[in-house]
Structures are given as structure tokens and as C-alpha cells.
Image: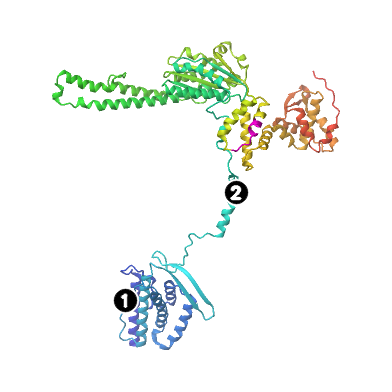
Amino acid sequence: MGTEHTTSEHESETTDAETSRRNDPSPDGTDPANAADPASDDPGSDGADAGSNDATSVDAVVESDARESDDAETTGGTGTTGGTKESRSGMMDNDRDHDQSADPGTKASPPETVPSGSNRSEANSSSTGSARTTADAETTDAETTADAETTTDVDADLDTGVDADVDVAVDHSPSRDRSSTDVDLDGVVFQGDADDEDESQGLFDDLLSGEPIFENKEVLRPSYTPHELPHRTDQINRMATILVSALRGDTPSNILIYGKTGTGKTASAKFVSNELESTSKKYDVPCEVEYINCEVTDTQYRVLAQLANKFIQQNQEVIADRIDELETLRSRVEDASPEVENAPPEVENAPPEVENASHEVDDAPLTNTPFDDPDAIDARIEELRDDAETMEEVPMTGWPTDRVYSTFFDAVDYHERVAVIMLDEIDKLVEKSGDDTLYNLSRMNSELDNSRISIMGISNDLKFTDFLDPRVKSSLGEEEIVFPPYDANQLRDILQHRADVAFKPDALTEDVIPLCAAFAAQEHGDARRALDLLRTAGELAERSQAEVIGEEHVRQAQDKIELDRVVEVVRTLPTQSKIVLFSIILLEQNGVHNINTGEVFNIYKRLCEEIDADVLTQRRVTDLISELDMLGIVNAVVVSKGRYGRTKEMSLSVPIDETEAVLLSDSRLGDIENAQPFVQARFDN
């Protein structure tokens, strides 16, 4: 009993020592937690440690553990459990020795020797020493294989007859547990990902697969200003001869330009304006052109506010440039001044010729300038900064008109310049707000001190001046230029000139441009219409992925542009709405004007009987008439009949013949063509 007690105490001390060595990191950085504990009383911890240090099948270890436990029972005493663990650790140690011998680069550390108790039996001493040696060997194995990624082939032959051959790539990096079996899947493409990429080929990928036909589509848009305008040389030269006086500092005459839509009025005026501004910069003459579209800016307040803000912005840019020039001049003066200010005393008493030489060097930067000294430069800089701060932009609403006009006047007259104000669609401004704006602009030159203003008006209405005040008309229409419509040959030249830039080479067949010119010329010689037709034909060809634009694309474009939206709306109306509309057409054809709801309802009932359709109530028919009014097909207004109540009076807003043809194209309404329902005579007061 004494021997067994002594041995148990010694084993307890050994267990404590092993536990502390496992918890404290070893000097070489090895984590002792990865080493097996052969003296532990918990068999599960040994199995976990063994499994973490080797990728061996768990079932094989358990089977081996069971066999070793049966053999160890014959030794007796307190060393049975320790012998079982030692045998298991010995098997795993042999496997590791085999792996190390396979790796010539692995160097094993010498095992650490732990003395055993002297009163222990030989069998227990041998088992305990073997267990400790196995634990040290496992720790050494963990140290030597921590930085290597190995491939372990585990062949486990279980008693059940199942053979497992596993080839797993294990990363034994220090930051990862050795039990981890992460597989590097970088660069691996799964079939699902490839299928998703194929499914992503969608709508726009198919449209982009074809070769583009256009080289620069913007050339065919109305907003583009070309570098050359064919067949408008006379009009351009006439405008240039009028505006050339602006480059001499004089006030140009006011110009009114007339012409139908698409005759090149705006394009020619912008072309001349660009040439005027570029020439003024070339000769350093202050000349500016401001463009206002009166179709959008159609009130006096908005026109004056927009012009004032444009001139204020230009004035601020001029002030900024002037301040930079003055600061540069001030720096040059400062660079020259220290030579006199820091001169030695003997120079101050120098002869007069020396003093004069010094004085000439000091005044050199200010030569030919209006400034006598640096203080004058600083004062001018402060004055310019104050001017920039006081320039307040005009809001689009909220100010009295006289304040807006005063701000515009001050902005224009801030410095010397000649300003040409181009008012496109000037007739829209007159229709909306009268001729007050034109009167104020045409009378400004008599009040301006530094600048001069010229007005260039562009209009489609040849008679809009008939509504102007005689004083405005006399001052505004000083020069008039008329732009005639283009003929087919001129349109062909214009289209050819634009097509050379807009399309890729050989993208047009020979009959495309003549056909576009013929379609545009047979209506009213509209160059804008011809350009739209050519651009639409190119877009249709590109959408169909055609290689060239042919005659069929031009005809498709013509049909698309000519499509009457109102007729298309009539064709898609419901049947009941078509019957109501046809009732209104019959009344119009029979000479009835200011048609009321009751008359429409009477004809509607008779037509429904003709085609065997359901008859709606009069209230519902009134709602259908309101829908037709909302679509712009009819014009309906509510009128009061005094004691007889109120009713809707309506009239057609679309051509009768075309609308009737569309309605009769409906198979259900086709039988109405020969029907002539009774129309009650009505005497209008």
C-alpha cells in the first residue's frame, strides 16, 4: 500500500508538471496545447489531442484504443489507464515518425526526459516513460510541421471491412488549427457561375452586337450648327455686312429675319454670330452675342432677367481678369521697390544722376499705366472687388419689373462693348407679353453711356409686325431678310453635306438622299424635316441590324413621321366610344352645329340598334364625351340654357373624312356605312 500511495503521489506531481508545461508557451514558440497529455485521467481529451495532431480516422483510433485497453488490463495496478493512453500515443507517434522520415527537410528535436518515481513497478515505469516520450515527440512533430502544407494519405482498414482512402490538402499555417481541412478554391469556376454569365446576356447585349451605322448622329439634329451652310451664302453675307459695324465700335442696325420652318434662319444667324465673336477676339474688340429662345422665355420679366444674369456673369469674369492683371502689376512694383528702399546711406547722398537712375527703375512698372503709385493700384483692386460684390443676380420671379430693367441696364453699361441680342421666335414674345420688351430694348441706346445694343429678331410669322406699335416697328425693322424655302436639289446638297460627317463610309445606298429630299421638298422645303427623315431612316436600319440604309428604311421613316397620333387614338378607342364619336360625325355631316348631349344620345341609340350593341345610359354617354374631349378629338363646353338646365355643346377637333374612314375600318361598325339615322331638324336662334 505504501508503494502504491507513493506512486500515486508521484503521478499526481507529474500530471501537474505536464499541465503547467502545456499551458505555458514553449521557448521556441510551439503551442503546447497541440501536444497530447499522456498522464491525463480523461480519455476523451487524449482522443481529441490525437485527432488534432493527425488526420487519422477517428474510428480507427477508437478501434486501436479498445484493443490496447484489453491488453493493458493484464498488467493490473494503477497503471492500467496510463498504459492504454501510452499505447495509443505510441501508435500515433510511429505514424508521425513515418511522416517525418518521408520529409527530409524535417528535423526532430530531442525528447525531453522526465524522471519517474523509484518505488514504481517496472511495468508502470516503462509505460509512463513511453507515454512521456510520445508526448514530447508529438510536440516536436507539431513544431516541425506547423509551417508546411502537406498532403496526408490516410488508409484506414476498419473491422467493418470499409476501406477509406482520403486525399485532403491541409494548411498547417500557424494562424490555423491543424484540424482544419480548408481547400483552396481560388480560380475554380463552377458550372452555376458559367450559367449565370450566359443568362446575363440580355437586351442591350443583343442590340450592341451589330455594327453601328452612325459616325456622329448629332450632326443630323436641328441644334447642330455646321461650319458651312449650302445655299444660304447670300443671306449670310447680308447679315455680315450689317453687323460688321460692331467690330468698328459702332451700333449695328436692327435686323428682322423671316422665313418658314426649316429654311435655315436660326442656323445662319448662329453661324454669323460665332464668326462675329471669334473675329472680335482676334482684333480685341469687345463684342458679344446673347441668344434668347422666346418660345421658352416668353415674358418681359424672364427676358430681362435672363439677359441681366448673362451680362452680370460676364462682368464678374472681366473683373476677375482685371484684378489678376493689377495684382501682377503690384508684384512687379514690389520687386523693383526694395532696391531703393534698402539702399545704403551713401546712395541716398549720391549725385543727382544716380538718384534719377534709381527713380527710373522704381517707376518702370507703372510706365504707361493710369497709376502713380502702388497705393492707387490697391485702391483700384478694392473698388473692383466691391463692384463684384454688389452685382446681384436677378431671380426668375419676385422682383418688380422696373428693378429688373434697372439691373439689366447697369449690367450692360458696366464697361464698353457692343451687344447683339438675338431673339428667336420673337413673335411668341409679342403674342404673350406685347411689345413692351421690344420697345424698351430698342430705346436703350439713347440712355447707355459705355455700351451699344443691337436686336436681331427671328420669326416664322411674316405679319407679326402688323401688331406692333408704330414706334417699335420703325426702330425694330431697320433691316429685313427673308429666307425662301429649299427646293429638292438644295435639300439634296444639304443632306449630302451632313451625311458625309454623320454616317460611316458606304452606309447609304444611292437612292436614300434623293428620296429624303423629295419627301421634304414636296411639302414645304423644310430642311429640318429632311434631316429628321434621314436620321430616322438610319435609326431604323441600325435597329434592324442592317449594314446599309436603303430605300425601304426611308419609306418606313416617312410612315413613322407621318403617323397621325389622333388617328391612331381613334383606331384604338373602345366600341362604345367609337359609336358616340360616329354619332357626332353624322350630326356634323348633316349640318348640325353646336351639338348637344341629347342629340348625340338620340343618334347613339339608333346606331346601337343597327349593329345590335348594348345601349348605355345618357349619363354614361356624357362621360364618354368627356373622355373624347380629354383626348382632343372633340371640343366640348358646358353651356347654360337658363330654366332648361345645362348641357354640353361639342364640335369635332379632327378631320371628318379621315376619322370616319378609321371608324368604318372596324368590322363591327362596317354595317353603319349605309345607315342614315333620322336627324331631327333644329332651329338655332
Q: Which mark is residue 222?
A: none
Quadrant (top left/top right/bottom left/bottom right) for the N terminus: bottom left
Say whether residue 371 is magenta. no
**Corner quadrant of residue 620:** top right
Residue 667 in the figure: left or right of residue 637: right
Helix, strand or loop at mark 2: loop
Q: CA distance from mark 1 to mark 2?
A: 67 Å
Q: Does residue 649 sit above or below 547 in this rendering?
A: above
Please tell me whether mark 1 or mark 2 is closer to you in this view.
2
Query: Residue 339 placed where, x, y %?
Result: 21, 26
Number of other residues with Cα within 10 Å of mark 2, as a class: few under 14, some 14 to 19, many 20 or more = few
Q: By what rule are the colours in the image chosen?
A: rainbow
* Residue at image coords 36%, 76%: 137
Number of other residues with Cα within 10 Å of mark 1, as a class: few under 14, some 14 to 19, many 20 or more = few
**Corner quadrant of residue 142:** bottom left
Q: Does residue 26 sit above or below 372 in this rendering?
A: below
Q: Which mark is residue 110?
A: 1
Q: Amino acid at mark 2?
A: Gly
Quadrant (top left/top right/bottom left/bottom right) for the C terminus: top right
In this figure, what is the number of numbered marks? 2
Helix, strand or loop at mark 1: loop
What is the span of residues highlighted in magenta in the rendered image? Answer: 506-516
Query: Residue 125 placed where, x, y %?
Result: 34, 85
Q: Amino acid at mark 1?
A: Pro
Say whether residue 512 is magenta. yes
Work out whether mark 1 precedes mark 2 in sequence or the reverse, and give the earlier one. 1
Examine the rendering and report whether any part of residue 297 can be seen.
no
Q: Which residue is mark 2?
A: 202
In depth, the one of 487 and 130 nearer the eye is 487
Query: Residue 609 placed where, x, y %?
Result: 85, 35
Residue 113 in the figure: left or right of residue 99: left
In depth, the one of 681 and 259 nearer the eye is 259
